[in-house]
Image (spheres, coloured by chain):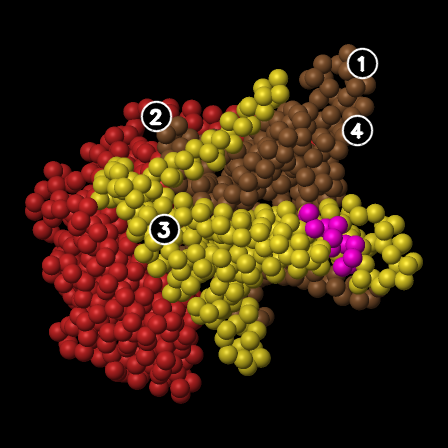
Amino acid sequence: MNIFYLLPALTLITITFGLPIIRYFWISFHASSLLTGLEYIPNYGSNWLRIIGDDRFWRDTIQTLRFTGVSVSIELIIAILIALLLNQKLRGRGVIRAISFLPWALPTAVMALGWRWIFNSPYGPIDQLLNLFGFASLNILSEPRLSWIGTVLADVWKTSPFISLILLAGLQTIPNDLYEAFILEGGTKRQAFFRITLPLLEPYILVSLLFRVAQAFGVFDLIQVMTGGGPAGSTESLAGYAYLNAMRFLDFGYSATIIVFSFIVLILVCLIGWITISNSKRILSS
Amino acid sequence: MNNIKGLKTLGLLLVTYLFFNHIAKAERSLNANTTNINILMPAPFADSTSGLVKEFNTTNKGNIRINVTRGPLETEAVSDLAISTLLLGENQYDILLVDITWLAKYAAADWLEPLDKYIPVGDWKRLAHGARLGNDYNNKIYRWPLVSDMGLLYWRKDLMDSPPKTPEELLTIASKLKKDGKVKYGYVWQGRQYEGLSCVFVEVLAGFGGSWLDKSLNPNLDSDQSIEAANWMLSLIESGASPKSVTNFAETEVLQVFEAGDAAFMRNWPYAWSELHKSDSQIKGKVGVTSMVSILPGNQASTLGSWGFSILKLSRNTKEAYQVIRFLTSEKAQRELFLKNGYTPTSRNLFKDQLLQQHSEILPYLEKALSITKGRPQTPLYAQISNVLQTELSSLLTKQKSTIEAMKSANKKTIDILSSAGKKK
Amino acid sequence: MKRLNIYILILLIWSLLPFLWQLVTSFSTTEAILEPFSFTGNHWTLDNYSQLLTANPPFWQYLINSTIVGCSSTFITLVLAIPAAYSLSKSNTKTQSLFKIIFLATALFPYVLLFLALLELARYFDLGNNLFALALPYAGLSLPIAILLLLSAFNDLPKDIEEAAKIEGMNLVQLLRWILIPLIAPATASTALIIFIFSWNEYPIALTWISQSDKLTLPVAIARIAGSSVYSVPYGAYAAATVLGSIPLILLVLIFQKGIVSGLTQGAVKG
């Protein structure tokens, strides 16, 4: 009976996650492109050799990791601040909360267009304001050193509310008496934050971190719409590169290989992150 | 409990929608004798041909009906849409409006119907030379051109007496006008990392006497001419003749700047002309058109753009589809599209047409540009090698790499792509 | 107290500014869009909106499409997730933690990378251009997180309720329908909202599964909006589409913002 209730859900999950992953592994050992007439022809790992020597893949890996690391860290800090603020007793708290969750609720692809327009040079508001006050244009999206920061900013804006939502739920499980007792014993508010709030929030922080790392690692629509991967490929992500190979170059064998390698990179990153966190915890507690 | 009420309302809405959807479908299938020909076009083409489509549908009522799907605006986005339809294996469209750079890829994927058996020999010869290019793959014709497109240099008559002829002149005039405060920017062009950048480069490269691939299809991107051409594009930005932001400009941004009167020169396609002569244009009557600059006069070149109709293999109505294509590309249709939208004709005759010449002063320039068009490499792997070129050009324009380094790397990667193809074949 | 207000103000500006800019742009004329800070001449217009609503297909079609996809994927997910979560909550701790790890791993998966294989599935089973079919991968993608959220909600329920119901002679379906589902309603509501927003906003799968223009979902449709004139940037229309497409979500968030937080608390995401 147990299984009977679980089975439909498990089936659908297997079809959407399990089958594709197995399929990707299979395709990654085949050539399937225009040159094979889109048929699958075994090529015995030559895709894997190609990807190891593909500078672009490794550059995209680094760029994707940079995007993920920077945006998730900033998001976490901002989200904690927002969650603390929203947890206060405020007038009109409902409306304030709704407004601060708004960015999360809007479609990424759509708001990415909005951000592209905000960063537009010379007609976007940022450049217009700068020019109005006599400064030079920033050209955020045309400058390879800045363009990825532009995408990070848009991502931070879009997804911090999601983390703050989870953290807010966490904050509400912390009983107020804990704080009152702590203050009575002579602790400051700041100390309370580090001694009570943060430790009790830890599981929530971890869960939201895991989620965000995984989702940021697969960043696609945001970048596709804002920069298309440019300039000079400086914002191209792994998902974007896989999309390009499949939908523009019609090279499905290689696209699948990129995806398989992205899985591997992500799992490695998660493992390393996990080990670092548990190690540092052990050091801190000893 | 409110939630449940909401769900009920939504359910009701859903049922209503399905009901109306059903009625609409039933209505559509009523005209069973009519052959429906579905065409996917980028939005601007769907808009400009809407009059012709209406005309065709009235005269052929009960027999053939054209349904146009208004695709996205950007070329790449249309391609994505077309490809996902084709990959889904749906026979949703009979005709596709195909960009010149897609043709080899689509033909190699076996998605297109060869047109040779439909086309009378004489008809094909009526097309202008440039319009005949880029429609074939492996000696078969897959596409009938709708509009010729070639790269043009737009210049401001109120700021100079005659347009520059050499790269040197263009750079000096543009930076001087900017320095003197006559315009905000000198010369604007497509510098964003996308297909437009390849188009710009093809013209400039030809002007410097070089070429992308040589006759035996080996890349030539690390030649002296290629490096000089790339260096010149970089110097446009460094000297201030072009703004730094050109590295994120596509056609739309470029036109926006030029239309606002903020630039002295613009590189764009013929349709910009009619856009610049709309009633609310700020620079109406102040614009001249010429071809891209070159070191030697004989090397002047225009990148060939051009869109054309192809019939999809999955179509069940190829005969009717061909009839539709010929209607939409007839001389009468070309005339209308030229007068209304400034689309460059494809028939040789029309360039000598008095009425058209009277209507638009740029017709002779278009004819000239069409005679010096330079195609982009025709290979199914075009998307890959163009992507390599765009990325490397973009990285040298934004000073991520030196010119020599970037062009050498572009050359090597192009060789890799083309040779991997040779091996597997 | 005063400092708090300043913080609130910063938060509101941060959250709203990009959206407000869209709002301003959506009411601006083409010329005004190019000079946003000079308010001379004709600055304001409704053209962008009328253009959207008179386009073919009209804009509300996409709203309906997205609503259909959002509702059906939410519905499918909940129908599958509630029994699954319930049966897991009844199983022993070992099984439970095993499944928790599996679901967590899948929920963390960057689903974007699945687009290519999902496109193949769509072709194989002929699921392209069908809004209800599009709900299937969405449901599949949302199931792991939905089960996790609901599982913790079930685990938090006091055990004696069920015992009491069994003594009353209720069977399992009745138990779920009359006792358990109402009790976990807050968690269900917030789960539903998360799924709905995900399906409403999803882009890459919709991009490859739907190619027929009257079946596009909102994000894809907006990204494909074309200008009224040849090759001029239709930012005004984009902005207007953003505003129209956001209204339902703003309403949803306004209505459910309280429930969503308390629902997540009930489920205690920590697992």
Residue for point 55% across, 81% down: A134
Which residue is under mark 2? B31
Q: Which of pointers 1 and 4 lies earlier in the amino acid sequence?
A: 4
The CA distance from mark 1 to mark 4 is: 16 Å
Write down which chain is painted brown. C
Which residue is under mark 4? C158
Of residues B210 and B297, the one nearer the viewer is B210
Which residue is under mark 1? C167
Identity of the residue furthest to the front in this view: A286
Compared across the picture, whether C48 is left or right of B174 comes to right
Image mark 3: chain: A
Marks 2 and 1 share the same chain = no
**Chain A palette colour:** yellow
Write down which chain is painted red. B
Q: Element at badge 4?
A: loop
Residue A199 lies in magenta, yes or no? yes
- Residue B201 spot, x, y in % from top left: 26, 67
Residue type, label 3? Leu
